[in-house]
């Protein structure tokens, strides 16, 4: 008798969970081309294991199961050997800010014990489809607790916050204890620890649903703010690697997660040593992710989770323009992507990248001597 090999680890995709917070816009529907009724889509939770929203698998043999169930039943085979036991450790979401989000702070691991909350480090990566935006992170020079409290009372908090102008692909790291806010215009991927201790300090004089101001938590916030943190700035690209058809650079490496941008012009074999899962978010172009018996096509603005026990997948790019945005300047390369071409139907690339093509024969993404590539944001522990 034979025994059935159950394919329980493969590239997992999930149904997004939408949030219609008052400050949200419509770009998740319009720019990312999602088939949704019109309305406000402030956030799309891509990978989440929380009570307020739990990801449900929508492909393969695990379809219908929640990320929570997978974390419990697969354990280290899902999250990797270096993850702590418990809920899935990260939350990954898309944020579309038509209006500014509240000014807030989360505890650091040191201050969380003081206030009885959970620590939360987060970071933002501006999507390729973002034109321009601004965030606030940290305090301006010389501002301490007294000046900060005065600014709260005068309703002039913007004066004491460190503003950072963002363009597509910029990234900002926000450790616990750092005051921050996302301003209007931002269209971001947010990567954060799975935690929801948020102290709202200031809400721009806005009212929430029901016409009342949303609750503020100034006292707790003042206890967890790191008054000496002036480090906030855009994270420079680092660890740039370039090898035939593949370019990557580090976006962020901290104890809670590692984030990189990958640009694929040719198929790539992606290996995993089992220490961590990997989340792949496609920022422009289309990428076909294949493991034995399973093939997933990721369009711009979509993601998948590769369980830690899945030792190898192949990634085949199909190049198109970024969703609604400008092509990346690939280390000085001139891009020849023409605006208006459907991301999955760029002439000369779609056929090359169809599932089933041998990974080593497809020159996807190279046209007329200049090249661009499908862009991914890759997240591990
Ligand atoms: Zn936050």
Image (spheres, rainbow, N blue to C red):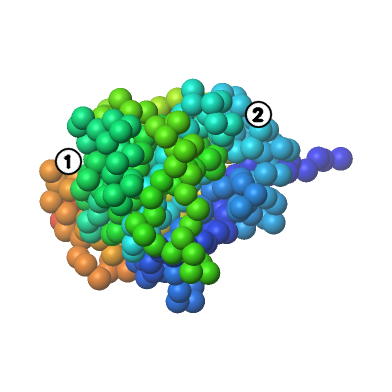
Q: Is residue 89 above or below residue 375?
A: above
Q: Which sits in the foreground, 70 or 287?
A: 70
Q: Where is residue 160 in the image (x, y as percent from the top left)?
A: 24, 41
Task: Kindly report which numbered mark, 2 or 1, lies closer to the viewer in this rendering.
Answer: 2
Q: Which of 243 and 3 is in front in this view?
A: 243
Measure the C-alpha gap from mark 2 to mark 1.
Answer: 40 Å
For disc 1, the marked residue is 331
Say what secondary structure mark 2 lies in: loop
Q: Which mark is residue 205?
A: none
Left or right, 69 with reference to 376: right
User: As displayed, is residue 141 above or below residue 324?
Assistant: above
Mark 2 or mark 1, earlier in chain: 2
Q: In which quarter of the image is residue 75?
A: top right
Disc 1 crowd, CA 10 A, few/some/many (<14, 14-19, 20+): few
- Taking the image as drawn, is residue 345 in sight? no
Q: Can residue 214 be seen in this view?
A: yes
Q: Which residue is drawn at 49% across and 26% down?
A: 111
Q: Which of 346 and 157 is in front in this view?
A: 157
Q: What element carries label 1?
A: loop
Q: In this view, does 376 lie to the left or right of 88?
A: left
| Label ID, residue 85 | 2
- Considering every residue shown, the one lying at the far bottom of the view is 38
Quadrant including the N terminus: top right
Q: Which residue is drawn at 22% across and 56% down?
A: 132
Most foreground residue, 72 or 354: 72
Rendering quarter of residue 9: top right
The residue drawn where x is 61% and y is 52% is 52
Q: Where is residue 339 in the image (x, y as percent from the top left)?
A: 21, 67
Labelled pair 2, 1 in contact (Cβ < 8 Å): no
Q: Does the residue labelled 1 lie within 8 Å of ligand 1?
A: no
Q: State the residue lying farthest toward the right.
A: 1
């Amino acid at each position: 008798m034979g025994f059935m090999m159950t394919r329980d680890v493969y590239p997992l995709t999930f149904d997004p969970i939408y949030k219609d917070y008052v400050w949200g816009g419509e770009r998740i529907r319009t720019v990312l081309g999602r088939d949704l009724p019109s309305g406000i889509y402030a956030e799309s939770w891509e990978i989440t294991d929380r009570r307020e929203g739990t990801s449900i698998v929508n492909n393969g043999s695990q379809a219908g199961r929640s990320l929570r169930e997978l974390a419990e039943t697969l354990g280290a085979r899902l999250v990797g050997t270096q993850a702590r036991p418990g809920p899935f450790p990260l939350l990954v979401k898309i944020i579309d800010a038509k209006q500014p989000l509240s000014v807030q702070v989360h505890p650091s691991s040191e201050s969380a014990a003081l206030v009885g909350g959970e620590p939360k480090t987060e970071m933002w990566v501006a999507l390729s489809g973002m034109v321009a935006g601004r965030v606030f992170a940290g305090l301006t020079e010389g501002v301490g607790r007294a000046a900060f409290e005065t600014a709260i009372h005068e309703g002039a908090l913007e004066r004491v916050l460190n503003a950072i102008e963002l363009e597509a692909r910029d990234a900002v790291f926000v450790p616990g204890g750092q005051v921050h806010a996302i301003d209007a215009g931002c269209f971001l991927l947010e990567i954060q620890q799975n935690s929801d201790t948020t102290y709202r300090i200031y809400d721009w004089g806005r009212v929430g649903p029901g016409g009342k101001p949303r609750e503020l938590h100034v006292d707790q916030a003042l206890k967890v703010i790191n008054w000496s943190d002036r480090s906030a700035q855009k994270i420079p690209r680092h660890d740039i690697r370039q090898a035939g058809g593949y370019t990557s650079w580090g976006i962020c490496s901290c104890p809670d997660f590692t984030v990189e941008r990958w640009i694929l012009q040719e198929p790539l074999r992606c290996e995993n040593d089992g220490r961590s899962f990997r989340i792949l978010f496609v920022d422009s172009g289309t990428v076909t992710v294949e493991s034995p018996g399973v093939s997933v096509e990721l369009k711009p603005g979509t993601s998948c989770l590769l369980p830690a026990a899945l030792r190898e997948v192949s990634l085949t790019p199909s190049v198109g323009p970024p969703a609604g945005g400008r092509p990346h300047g690939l280390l000085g390369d001139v891009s020849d992507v023409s605006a208006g071409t459907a991301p999955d139907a760029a002439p000369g690339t779609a056929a090359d990248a169809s599932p089933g093509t041998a990974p080593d024969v497809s020159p996807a993404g190279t046209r007329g001597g200049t090249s661009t590539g499908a862009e991914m944001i890759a997240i591990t522990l």
